[in-house]
Amino acid sequence: MQRRTLIQTAIAGLAAGALPAAFAQGSWPTGKAITYLVPFPAGGTTDVLGRLISQKLGMVLGTSVVIDNRGGAGGSVGSEIASRAAPDGYTMLGGTISSHAINVSLYPKIGYDPVKSFAPVTLIGTNPVVLVVNAASPYKTLKDVLEASKAKAGGLSSASAGTGTSQHLSLELLAFKSGVKFTHVPYKGSGPAIQDVIGGQVDMMFDTTVVAAPHIQSGKLRAIAVTSAKRLASLPDVPTIAESGLQGLTDFEVVSWQAIFVPAGTPAPIVDRLHKEIRTILAQPDMQEKMKGFGMEPADMTPTQIASFQKAEVEKWAQVIKAAGVKVE
């Protein structure tokens, strides 16, 4: 009996030793600051969401949550830094469709595995993309766009915020599924890209509702279709691409998304606590209002559901990128 007790005690001690010291002592979080790493420059959606969440989360946890912007390579630079952080509950990462679904197939080497290097905490929300043309364009439906692109040498021109962005890959997915060719015209950001669509220098563009909606409402752009599975409350008269009923497009769906991750190996009780607290924060009326103001659709998934969703996204974009031959050196 005494020997059995000693063995059980030893096993328990080894298990505790396998966890970060702070958690093993049951003291997480301590007064130590939590780093919320944003893998993009300040001012973008990921950064804004991170600052809103971190302020409220710090108050709930009784410690500081500090934003650390580490931009570069579509979110890959900051994500690699986060993947190498200690899994002790003191590093969080604002991940996106780029950093955690697209980049692994787009860049030759990103220094982390978007699935294996992290544990998902929560999916903050999704941001559908809308296909737009100049208000004076002759194209009024998706069928018009596809037929015109078939008839034009090289296809219609389509702007994007840059190679590998959700705007660009929405175009590539449409080309892949429809079998119709387009000419991709990458810009350094959505601003100059959408201005050239408004000015008629480029035929069309996929862009987020955050950027495109004001121009649609002002009458400068015509919305052809949205990439979400269902119509948007903010654009109820705009059909989904899937609704077109065109061959190969009945399951078409693209949504840009924002999520929060922690390094793989972070103890499950810490992940569960963060998930619970952040979901409570996101459900607050002021947060819901702000998110919808960004054009985001709030989302609610368990960490397990997020993991399944993310794996499906990685596989989907790997197929699209391979089929389209998209490369970034």
Image: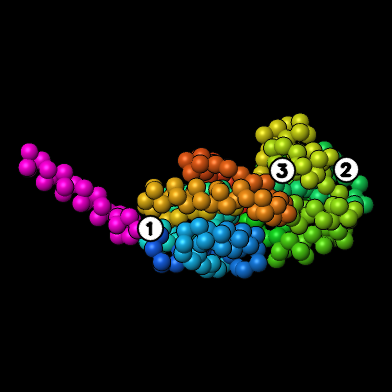
Q: Crowding at label 3, few (<14), some or many (≥20) Cα neighbours within 10 Å?
A: many
State which tag comes first along the sequence, 3 or 2.
2
- Secondary structure beneath dot 1 equals loop
* Most foreground residue, 201 or 282: 282
* Most foreground residue, 318 or 292: 292
User: Is 2 situated above or below 56?
Assistant: above
Query: Number of callouts in the render?
Result: 3
**Residue at the spot of label 1:** 28
Q: Which mark is residue 227?
A: 3
Magenta stretch: give its range. 1-27
**Disc 3 residue type (three-letter):** Thr
Image x and y of residue 88, in percent: 37, 58
State which tag comes first along the sequence, 3 or 1.
1
Residue at horizontal 68 percent and vertical 60 percent from the top: 162
Image x and y of residue 189, in percent: 71, 64
- Secondary structure beneath dot 3 equals loop
Marks 3, 1: nearer the viewer: 1
Q: CA distance from mark 3 to mark 2?
A: 16 Å
**Disc 2 residue type (three-letter):** Lys
Task: Check the picture and name the quadrant holding the C terminus.
Answer: bottom right
* Most foreground residue, 60 or 104: 60
| Left or right relative to 311: residue 228 | right
**Residue at the spot of label 2:** 140
Q: CA distance from mark 1 to mark 2?
A: 56 Å
Residue at horizontal 80 percent and vertical 44 percent from the top: 235
Mark 3–mark 2 contact, CB under 8 Å? no
Q: Is residue 147 visible?
A: no
* Most foreground residue, 276 or 172: 276
Task: Check the picture and name the quadrant holding the N terminus.
Answer: top left
- Secondary structure beneath dot 2 equals loop
Mark 3–mark 1 contact, CB under 8 Å? no
Magenta span contains residue 64: no
